[in-house]
Image (cartoon, rainbow, N blue to C red):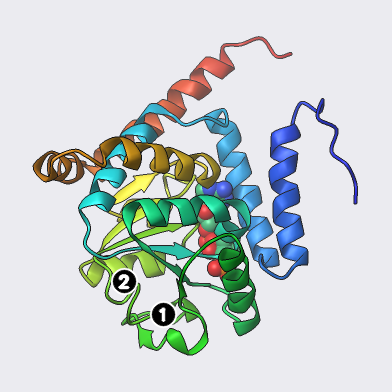
Amino acid sequence: MEEIPKSHPRYHSLIIRKKLVDAFRQGIVVPEGLIAHGRGEALDYILGEKTLEPAYRAIKAASALLLISKKPVISVNGNTAALVPKEIIELSKIINAKLEVNLFHRTIEREVKINKLLKSLGADEVLGIGDDASETIPRLESKRRFVSPRGIYLADTVLLALEDGDRTEQLVKMGKKVIAIDLNPLSRTARTANITIVDNVIRAIPLLIEECKKLSNSPRDELEKIAYNFDNEENLKAMINAIKDRLSMLTSLEVI
Ligand code: PTJ
């Protein structure tokens, strides 16, 4: 396997690509996941590959919401399992959330592989594997409609990343609070979720871990204030303005 030289200016980005390609070869990530990552990379490039201020605000609100939720669930797809497997397990333990595999390109082989990976890294329980996904999200035609009766179906809050807009919409219609991590502030998921973190899942999950730890001893009424005062539409507008400012700054630079 080809070595990536540490001195390469795009070393970190190449390592992330390698993680996804390795997971693709292992049957965890689908080819479509590689395409989705390419779109994400392009958007992340525009952000300067860093977390912008509005995303920090969304992360704080999301952490508060996760801490006050009674039945939070982290939804895991192929890309998330490939990029941040240890981190989602750590987060699930801090906020007492269940982990549920939920795939757009659903096959039992992939579910079993992701389950095995998460268990090998310390997950106690992984929902949504095979027959466990025996409930159905109403009005949804994709295979993402199959969910666990002890997980997403019952959840009050669902944290998801790299999601399609259809399921986000239906989860919200079911009365659930949805926290989405999506590098595209214009996507249907970004606009439909209750809290959207416009950031790379690679940075967002570790930041959520940090913030949940920080807020874990805060009184409930304070957490409620942080979570319920968050305005997703306003935050997305702020994010788009932050991107506009960044692009204006870049266009004023000499081309090098
Ligand atoms: O593993 P499966 O079968 O569930 O399939 C997963 C994919 C990703 C193939 C599926 O969910 C899909 O097709 O997703 P979309 O509709 O392409 O949406 C992916 C969204 O995530 C796009 O808006 C991307 O910009 C965004 N995105 C890509 N990479 C990242 C990201 N957002 C956050 N962090 C990333 N690393």
Element under label 2? Answer: helix
> Left or right: where does residue 135 sit relative to residue 76?
left
Labels 1 and 2 touching (C-beta < 8 A):
yes
- Figure quadrant of residue 224: top left
| Position of the C terminus by quadrant | top right
Q: Is mark 1 within 8 Å of ligand 1?
A: no
- Mark 1, residues whose alpha carbon is within 10 Å: few (<14), some, or many (≥20)? many
Q: In this view, does 80 lie above or below 30?
A: above
Image x and y of residue 221, in percent: 9, 43
| Furthest residue toward left | 221
Going 56% across and 12% down the picture, which residue do you hit?
Answer: 252
Q: Which of 35 and 51 is in front in this view?
A: 51
Residue denoted by label 2: 170
Q: Say which label, 1 or 2, has the lower sequence index.
A: 1
Q: Depth check: give the residue in front, 216 or 183.
A: 216
Which amino acid, mark 1?
Answer: Arg
Q: Where is ligand 1, by quadrant?
A: bottom right
Question: Which residue corresponds to the image point at 48% horizontal and 56% vertical from the top-left?
Answer: 89
